[in-house]
Image (cartoon, helix red, strand yellow):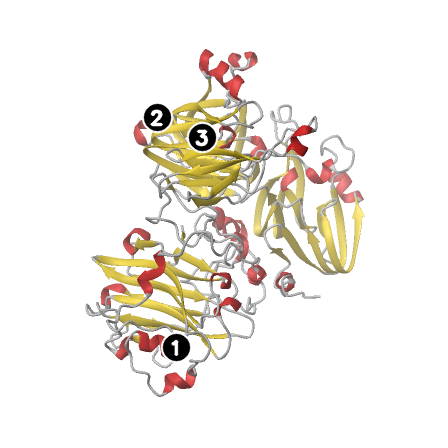
């Protein structure tokens, strides 16, 4: 499960992976540009006190080889191997940077990413595009830093000036070869003035206002570079541009649309609010090789004669001991035996497969529930799944997202609910507002402790609630219940005056403390 | 014209008989003497000299039990070139059989090598339930098979314990041939009065093997519905 990072997100590496031997891959490219991707090993003052920890093309490894530059492989333009437990204590921070070699600016860069791979599995990924930058000539992509424990931070901070300016910023001496590689470019934009105290600019990424850089990243043309074979080939598979490596999973092209990424800075902690998406939306999961959009892509190196088992290996179920396990982005497995064996309520007919002894029974809403449901349209046709065993839920290829509630609440439109733990309470909530056909909007509010599975058509976007967050009332899927909903309908006389037009120009505006979020799907019901 | 944005979608060099292009398109390298059976209407493009023969006599005989007998929804493709097949955006999985056998739900079969042994089997006791009439195609031998799935499929091992694996027939894609199947009705009187759970019957699999299911209960045969 690769976790998607957005600019400013931080996480403990121990939460991402148990391993300390990390592969860090950077993919960055732009038409006519060439890049120097380097790693700065900084001390506690964020200074490059020891030049031997400046890992770049001329110095591909640190003295004790805890940081090594591996070169381009597996779809990454540059890759590093970092062994965390061998890094000497004086090095507190590894800053991964990319600088343009020659002319050009960062806004010309296409979609790229930095990712962490551990144990053959991609665990973290931060994607960026050139649209987030302007005339900068360098970018600090991400930091791996020691603060009690090793942590990873997606930085995405542009930097004027080239590699030598970056090196000077970190307090390093520009050796002879560095200027040769990156000719000084002081003309044009005012250079980034390194503060005399030597505080690196990295921590300053928290500031910019939301709403910048709405440009969606362009589609990813490299998807076809992926091999599209399942079984070992008859001919040797030396496909161009796609080296195979046993250890590193093949590259994932940057998703065409990363939810929430365009919002420069989510306010506050990495997650949007309390109810956590079990995993980032839009990140498909396939059996053994998570985090790849084109699962049948890659011939697995060293796999014995393919046949059925080889072809099916990618789609194997992923057993875990947890109650809810996402099998891929469209299928969810519930283990009824877990969490006290409490039943699961699910939309009728959403079971696709089960193992064990499971009973399916009708779950009525009760008399009052039916009246309310009929009147508000927030009616769910539910079934109760009881017993011992594993049930797989899916519906119509909709994307599924588990949201774990820990005593808090979320509002979900009833048609977007696939399944939930019976321990959750739910009720119909009314949103008042003028100008809504029918007088009000209704939604389902779930609260308590348990998991709810929300389904969306297509990859949703999760937006943090800011002073100016609006959503179409037909496309909104869910929002954290702590945010306040205001109807902002645009009453247009001309439109509303015509008979037969239901005046569907009702927008919902959300207000709330930082940490609240809304989920919007690319599909208007 | 600026072709930069679409330049990445050019086909990759052929490296095997069947490959997927993206996730939903199948690319078959056709050669004379290596014929292919494909679902009628699944061709989206081809390059080279490929000919199509709908409902060839060999198929007519094999598939005489296929549904209503109005002709099997298969065509024989012959010739040299590159053939692109797709089924309304469903995910495509290519499987290289290595003297193995596989049972595929009829609607989820996209193409297979003509030299494979195959036969149409009706699933006993189930056909009368499923609206489409559940039938499956058993494929055996050494060669390539392409199957479709609405959404990324999941493969579940069955029969390790005492319990059977129950599958919603609408979500069933394929299974390994050795499995025993039987119908299970979880039908109660309450469903007659509108209080059903929506899960009326399942197929129970037992034995050693795997089952492939799709994350969708849409088993409509789109290629066929088009006529």
Pointer 2: what residue? A423
For the point 48% across and 23% down, which residue is it?
A382
Report which quarter residue A411 is drawn in: top left
Pointer 3: what residue? A419
A253 horizontally vs B40: left or right: left
Nearer-N-terminus badge (1/2): 1
A94 horizontally vs A125: left or right: left
Residue B213: x, y in percent? 53, 38
Q: Which of B50 and A195 is in front in this view?
A: A195
Q: Which of B47 and A256 is in front in this view?
A: A256
Mark 3, Cα crowd under 10 Å, few <14 / some 14-19 / many 20+, is many
Pointer 1: what residue? A163
For the point 76% across and 32% down, which residue is it?
B69
Nearer-N-terminus badge (1/3): 1
Mark 1, Cα crowd under 10 Å, few <14 / some 14-19 / many 20+, is many
The label on residue A267 is none
Which label sits in the foreground, 1 or 3? 1
Mark 2, Cα crowd under 10 Å, few <14 / some 14-19 / many 20+, is some
- In this view, A236 is above or below A173: above
Query: Gap between marks 1 and 2, in whole Å?
Result: 56 Å
Please say if the residues under marks 1 and 2 sit with CB atoms less than 8 Å apart: no
Label 2 resides on the chain identified as A
Query: Gap between marks 1 and 3, in whole Å?
Result: 52 Å
């Amino acid at each position: 499960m690769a976790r998607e990072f957005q600019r400013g997100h931080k996480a403990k590496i121990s939460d991402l992976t148990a391993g300390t031997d990390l592969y860090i891959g950077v993919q960055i490219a732009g038409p006519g540009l060439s890049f120097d991707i380097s790693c700065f090993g900084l001390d506690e003052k964020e200074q490059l006190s020891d030049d031997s920890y400046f890992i770049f093309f001329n110095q591909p490894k640190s003295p004790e080889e805890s940081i090594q530059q591996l070169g381009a492989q597996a779809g990454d333009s540059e890759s590093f191997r970092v062994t965390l437990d061998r890094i000497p204590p004086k090095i507190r921070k590894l800053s991964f940077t990319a600088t343009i070699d020659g002319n050009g600016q960062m806004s010309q860069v296409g979609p790229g990413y930095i990712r962490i791979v551990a144990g053959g599995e991609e665990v973290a990924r931060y994607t960026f595009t050139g649209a987030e930058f302007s005339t900068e000539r360098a970018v600090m992509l991400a930091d791996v830093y020691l603060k009690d424990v090793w942590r990873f931070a997606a930085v995405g901070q542009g930097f004027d000036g080239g590699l030598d300016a970056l090196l000077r910023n970190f307090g390093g001496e520009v050796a002879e070869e560095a200027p040769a590689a990156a000719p000084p470019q002081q003309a044009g934009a005012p250079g980034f003035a390194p503060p005399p105290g030597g505080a690196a600019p990295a921590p300053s990424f928290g500031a910019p206002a939301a709403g910048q850089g709405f440009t969606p990243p362009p589609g990813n043309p490299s998807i076809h570079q992926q091999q599209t074979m399942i079984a070992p080939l008859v001919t040797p598979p030396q496909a161009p541009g796609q080296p195979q490596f046993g250890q590193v999973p093949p590259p994932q092209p940057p998703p065409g649309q990363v939810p929430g990424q365009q919002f420069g800075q989510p306010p506050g902690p990495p997650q949007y609010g309390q109810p956590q998406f079990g995993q980032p939306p839009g990140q498909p999961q396939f059996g053994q090789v998570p985090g790849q959009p084109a699962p049948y892509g890659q011939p697995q190196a060293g796999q014995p004669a393919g046949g059925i088992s080889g072809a099916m290996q990618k789609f194997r179920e992923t057993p875990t001991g947890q109650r809810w396990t996402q099998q891929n982005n469209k299928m969810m497995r519930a283990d009824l035996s877990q969490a006290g064996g409490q039943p699961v309520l699910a939309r009728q007919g959403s079971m696709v497969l089960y193992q064990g002894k499971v009973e399916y029974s009708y779950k009525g809403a009760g008399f009052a529930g039916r009246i309310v449901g009929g009147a508000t349209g927030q009616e769910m046709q539910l079934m109760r799944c009881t017993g011992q065993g594993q049930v797989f839920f899916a519906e119509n290829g909709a994307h599924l997202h588990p949201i774990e509630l820990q005593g808090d609440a979320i509002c979900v439109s009833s048609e977007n609910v696939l399944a939930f733990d019976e321990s959750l309470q739910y009720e119909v909530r009314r949103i008042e507002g003028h100008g809504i056909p029918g007088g009000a909007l209704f939604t389902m509010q779930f609260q308590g402790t348990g998991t709810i599975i929300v389904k969306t058509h297509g990859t949703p976007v999760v937006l943090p609630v800011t002073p100016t967050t609006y959503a179409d009332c037909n496309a909104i899927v869910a929002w954290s219940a702590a945010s306040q909903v205001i109807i902002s309908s645009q009453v247009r006389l001309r439109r509303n005056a015509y008979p037969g037009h239901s005046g569907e120009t009702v927008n919902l505006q959300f207000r709330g403390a930082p940490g609240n979020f809304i989920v919007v799907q690319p599909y208007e019901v | 014209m600026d072709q930069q944005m679409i330049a990445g979608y050019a086909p990759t060099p052929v490296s095997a008989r069947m490959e997927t292009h993206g996730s939903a398109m199948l690319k078959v390298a056709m050669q004379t003497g290596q014929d292919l059976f494909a679902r009628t209407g699944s061709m989206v493009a081809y390059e080279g000299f490929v000919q199509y023969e709908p409902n060839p006599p060999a198929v007519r005989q094999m598939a005489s039990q296929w549904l209503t007998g109005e002709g099997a929804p298969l065509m024989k493709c012959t010739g040299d070139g590159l053939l692109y097949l797709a089924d309304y955006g469903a995910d495509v999985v290519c499987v290289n059989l290595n003297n193995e056998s596989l049972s595929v739900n009829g609607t989820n079969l996209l193409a297979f090598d003509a030299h494979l042994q195959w036969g149409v089997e009706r699933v006993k006791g189930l056909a009368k339930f499923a609206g489409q009439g559940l039938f499956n195609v058993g494929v055996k031998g050494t060669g390539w098979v392409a199957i479709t799935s609405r959404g990324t499929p999941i493969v579940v091992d069955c029969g390790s314990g005492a319990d059977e694996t129950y599958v919603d027939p609408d979500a069933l894609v394929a299974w390994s041939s050795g499995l025993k199947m039987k119908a299970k009705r979880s039908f109660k009187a309450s469903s007659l009065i509108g209080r059903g759970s929506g899960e009326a019957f399942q197929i129970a699999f037992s034995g050693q093997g795997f089952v492939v299911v799709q994350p969708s209960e849409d088993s409509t045969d789109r290629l066929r519905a088009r006529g």
